[in-house]
Amino acid sequence: MRIEELYSAASMQAQQLEQQHEELLSTNDELLSKTSLLQVSEEELRVQQEELSQTNAELIAKAHLLEERNIVVDQAKEAITQKMVELEQANNYKSEFLANMSHELRTPLNSVLILAKILKENKKRHLDEEETKFAEVIHKAGNDLLELINDILDLAKVESGQVDLDICNVAISNLSSELEMLFAEIARSKPIKFDVVTDPLLPKTFNSDERRIQQILKNLLSNAFKFTPENGSVSLKIGSLIQDGETYISFEVIDTGIGIPEDKFQTIFEAFKQADGSTTRTYGGTGLGLSISRELANVLQGELTVSSKVAVGSSFALILPLNREIDENPRNIEIPSLAITNTNSKRTVLIIEDDEDFADVIRTICSNNGLEATIAIDGEEGIRLANQLKPEAILLAINLPVIDGWAVLKRLKSNPETVDIPVHLLSARDESSIKIRTEGAMGLLMKPIKNLEIEKALETLIQLKNEGLRNVLLIEDHEVQSNVLKDQLKESKFNVTQAFAGAQALEYLNMNSNYDCIILDINLPDMSGLDLLDEIRTLKKFENVPIVINTAMELDRERLKRINRHTNSMVFKNSHSNNRLVEEVRFFIDNIKPTVEENPESVTESVDTFSSPDFLAPATLLLVDDDMRNIFALTSAFQETPLKFIIAENGQEALEKLESNPEIQLVLMDIMMPVMNGYEAITEIRKNPDYDNLPIIALTAKAMKDDRQKCIELGANEYISKPLDVDKLLTVITNLLIQEFSLESY
């Protein structure tokens, strides 16, 4: 019994052990399986780790490469920046070089041309015929060299971006007429058939730089006449074309000349290049004209094209945008809060005066006379308001902050929008009546000003603004020029009668006594213009009518004296003289009637025609120049005149000479000098009230932009660039001496 129990217990334990063994085996298999899976995972992890390491290595390599590239880019940027600095510096050097080289070339050339001209004129008969011809050759060669210098400087200015554009409203008829008139004589003398054809469907005007267009077309036409043989033809066709939906104006110059091979179309636009070497030898020229013209066309947002066939002829076309905006960077102009806007039907008067109390007094006077007054307290504000309001009249103080009244007046009269607004000046000091006339003002009221004087001035200004057509007799034998002038005068509301000969003019004068102004060309086909001038002044009804002389003739002293017995208004013909002529006529007509007949105590200045003295009785001039060659040349050129020269070699010495020589009546001032340059000297001279009316002529060999404007703004009366045209200089000196005498005797 006991044994059975033990056996049964042992069997049960054996079963339990077997069961546990099986469970252990199962657990062991499971562990083996998990171990296997773990090993697989470890292998996968190892592979991933290796891939990650490889990726990291690649990223590190790429980072190094990117860093290297960034370094290269930074170096490139730095190199570009440095190159830009160098280019800018080079441009500055180039500009300075142009100014200095212009001076260095023109200064000796000035002496050569002046002395060669003296020699070729041979007034003292010291030279024989052959020697005179030698002098003529020297003079011509000097002028050819001057033309080359001008072309090189012009091209350099264009390439360096130093060309300032004057975008304005260009009248196509005026442009074509001036070109036709300019080349008509060349066509007749060669002879070559020449015509100008304008598409009648074109608008009358377009916006561009008229002076630059003329420069391009003059070059194209000059080339056409140069390369076209006798009995050939040259034509200028002005029309329109459409490209990519945009409308353009086309100026096409067509000739029947020698033509250009197709493979030379690009070469001819390169500086100093022509179609071939024989062209230069046969026809002359530098090969710069087309290069300059193409660059200018690009600056004008256009292009210059060519088509040609050898022995048949050529066609050059200047293509420009027809609808260019005048102001490419328009600004929004706000009227300052001080201004009183014109919100009713009253007429507006603009008062430009920094004395607000005095301005309020004038405003009250305006209001009492039914006028709306708008006040500006400085020049810039006044100019903005003049453009904004287009007032009936302007009262302008000369002594203003920032920019003075003279500068304001100049800007008003140079703007087509404000040029016709009558301006009366206000000043605490007496001002030159010549300067008032020249700058375009109607007169001067000198402070303290009486109410009646202001009322009279306002009445005169409003009357001038509203007057109808005034009558002008235009005596000009050249029909094209006469028609161009007539059109410009008509645009300025003048009624024009044309006379093409002296006898015809006298016939009109005897029939009609209502002419308010006469424009007279001296060169007439049937009689001398000077004789006609004398005869007009014998007619009682025209003894005080303003006469403006319009001439291209070089005038000697006797002719000038004769003219100035009757008038001191003279305009020399050039590409811009018509505008000046219209301004002269406008001024004289506006000043025919005395402004204050009833008030003899009025200080309003009138503009009279001064009788001229013997203006070339000995006059003393101060010549300021550091180059003895120029001094010798100028004094030699004027040795037969009664002009006496006092010499100064720099600006500082000039001031000392003026102080010690009160008899000096005029100054010839060079600009580039040691110690004190011409700009500084002019500034110092104008600081002295004793020299307010002393005429100063700036003489400079510099050819950079703004030279003339800078000289005039500093106080020079005239600006003449070297090499000097002695006849022109003598004319300018004569006119300034006349004006100085007039001021002294007034």
Image: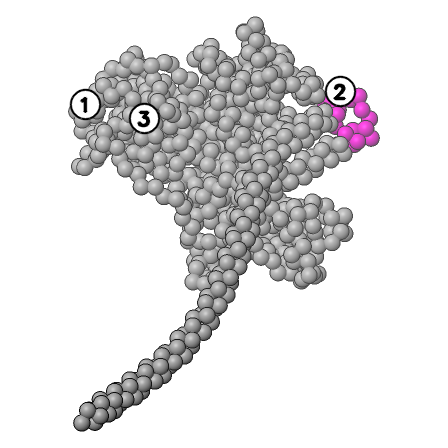
Labels in figure, total? 3
User: Is 395 or 286 nearer to us in this picture?
Assistant: 286
The answer to whether marks 2 and 3 mark residues whose Cβ atoms lie closer than 8 Å is no
Does the segment drawn in magenta span residue 86?
Answer: no
Residue 201's place in the image compared with 668, above or below, is below
Task: Using the rendered view, name the quadrant where residue 418 is placed.
Answer: top left
Q: Which mark is residue 78?
A: none
Q: Which mark is residue 378?
A: 3
- Residue stretch in magenta: 118-135
Residue 388's place in the image compared with 451, above or below, is below
Residue 368 image offset from top left, x and y in percent:
17, 24
Image quarter in which the N terminus is found: bottom left
Mark 3 vs mark 1, foreground winner is: 3
**Amino acid beneath label 2:** Lys
Task: Using the rendered view, name the quadrant where residue 599 is placed.
Answer: top left
Identify the residue shown where x is 30% and y is 88%.
Answer: 18
How packed mark 3 is, by other alpha carbons closer than 10 Å (few <14, some 14-19, many 20 or more), is: many
Residue 25's place in the image compared with 400, above or below, is below
Residue 340 image offset from top left, x and y in percent:
21, 31
Identify the residue shown where x is 32% and y is 36%.
Answer: 387
Q: Main secondary structure of the magenta part?
A: helix
Q: Sequence order check: which comes first, mark 3 or mark 1? A: 1
**Amino acid beneath label 1:** Thr
Q: Which mark is residue 124?
A: 2
Q: Sequence order check: which comes first, mark 1 or mark 2? A: 2
- Colour logic: one colour
Badge 1 is on which residue? 364
Identify the residue shown where x is 25% and y is 89%.
Answer: 10
